[in-house]
Amino acid sequence: MVSGPQPVALDVAIVGAGFAGLFGLHRMRGLGLRTRVFERGAGVGGTWYWNRYPGARCDIESLEYSYQFSEELQQEWHWTERFATQPEILRYAEHVAERFDLMRDIQLETSIDRAAFDDATASWSVTTDRGESFSARYLILATGCLSSTNLPDFEGLADFAGETYHTGRWPHDPVDFRGKRVGVVGTGSSAIQSIPLIAQDAASLHVFQRTANYSIPAHNAPLDPEHEARVKADYRGFRAHNAQLPFGAGFAPNEQGALEVSQAERDAEYESRWQTGGLGFLSAYADLLFDAEANRTAGEFLRRKIHEIVRDPEVAALLSPDQVVGCKRLCVDTGYFDTFNRENVTLVDVRSAPIRRITKTGLETADAHYDLDMLVLATGFDAMTGSALRIDIRGPSGQTLGEKWAEGPRTYLGLATSGFPNFFTVTGPGSPSVLSNMIPSIEQHVNWIADCIGHLEQRGLKRIEATREAEESWVAHVNEVADETLYPSCNSWYLGANVPGKPRVFMPYLGFPPYVEKCDEVASNGYEGFLLS
């Protein structure tokens, strides 16, 4: 009998070479473990490799949206802007990969098709789209929260004769909008960032909006050298301070409630936050995400701002959201609302007249046809679970992760899921992830996983699995925390509401400091809630 080639033996297989995969590889190497990262892109960087649309930029300040595991790296890397652009963030990821010699263990242009856990060997059998086979004692998903594009199922999309792009899968070569009739579908973060730049070049731009979104100006600028020097003089203290704030980012919190002060005082605070720019607006008052009446005052302020900026009152009214501030991801922009004062820009309300189909020459709504040369789909992501569920991952019973999560994702701490031994997720559902500063969250997760694996290795243990009871308790706790807030009050991608047929479950955990405390407590109690054998 002739047997095929033996699988390549690894200690750890990591899926994804974004910021989580890069740091995961660095930590696993530090444990002396044979590790390989599998990345479907042709380069590292994860979401910053794929999202190259015009205006793509981080909404967390550069000095915070960066690694802290290496003081040398923190000191030597110089960010040029307050909010870094996609090209600069990608250069940073590439620099990290080169500086720490990570590329030799990263396999690019490779997707994991299947991973199945074998009880007999206590290891994962991993198959790639190249037909390669690997065995790995541990499997870590570093697939990212915003990496699986949500492509709308529009009738006739394949028939469109013009150019079609999705913001989450943007070409690497520049896209020329000059002289083109462009349609942008969607008004989430990627649309809000790209629309002002597209409008500068396009002959005409039609923005097809179903739901208006709140957005705060970035007031981006070159990074102030004096501010950078102050931070770098005590980077450790800067990080420690921010880690104690609710989102794990340096949004100056206000302990007062919005209704404890006069309207004049409230408006002055909101104006100050507006002029400062960025997501810190949500920290203007302590109760904005908990009290509907308090939140209403923030919404009224932001709607007034939109009406001050947009000259056409009907357009301003359409651009003014009616939902809770923050229940959908708050956006950060550069000149978004002002763009609708341009003569070549038209806002189309597809809530009142829905999109019927894409035609060969453009887009048809319930009451009009729009001739287009180019269609930009800014329709977001299958967030937090999309990339994980595209892989056929099977536990020892044969149950797939998709079957396990059919009613919505179920995890313990967002790190593990019962029925899937030696399997970890970085910033998975049930962790702060997208409601926190992502890179510090990633580092906290990867450090916890590395310490856990180190604990197993030191004690000669071969297997770890979350118990069903611990998972049930954690899922209930995540829901209880969410239900105390206003987050579940609107249809958002936090709930999976942007993807047809996806179960409506609030996926992130609110509160970075209490989450870290819980993770530390679980580890110090001998990995309480896990079965080790």
Image (cartoon, rainbow, N blue to C red):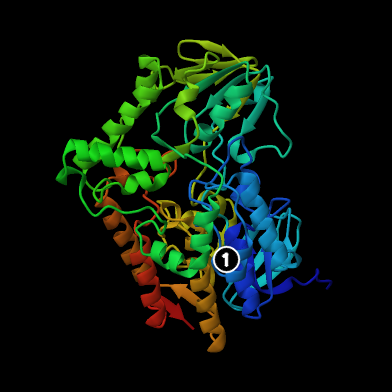
Above or below, 194 against 203 in this view is below
- Percent coordinates x, y for residue 295 in the rendering: 25, 40
Residue at point 38%, 61% (across, down): 512
Position of residue 376 in the picture relative to residue 210 (left or right): right
Q: Looking at the picture, tell me which residue is in the foreground, 436 or 235.
A: 235
Question: Residue at the right extreme?
Answer: 2
Is residue 112 among the parts visible in the rendering? no
- Percent coordinates x, y for residue 417 in the rendering: 45, 65
Which residue position is annotated with label 1? 140
The amino acid marked with disc number 1 is Ile
Above or below, 453 against 306 in this view is below
Residue at point 55%, 49% (across, down): 223
- Quadrant the N terminus occupies: bottom right
Q: Looking at the picture, tell me which residue is in the foreground, 70 or 424.
A: 70
Name the secondary structure under disc 1: strand
Position of residue 219 in the picture relative to residue 460 (left or right): left
Residue at point 47%, 30% (across, down): 187
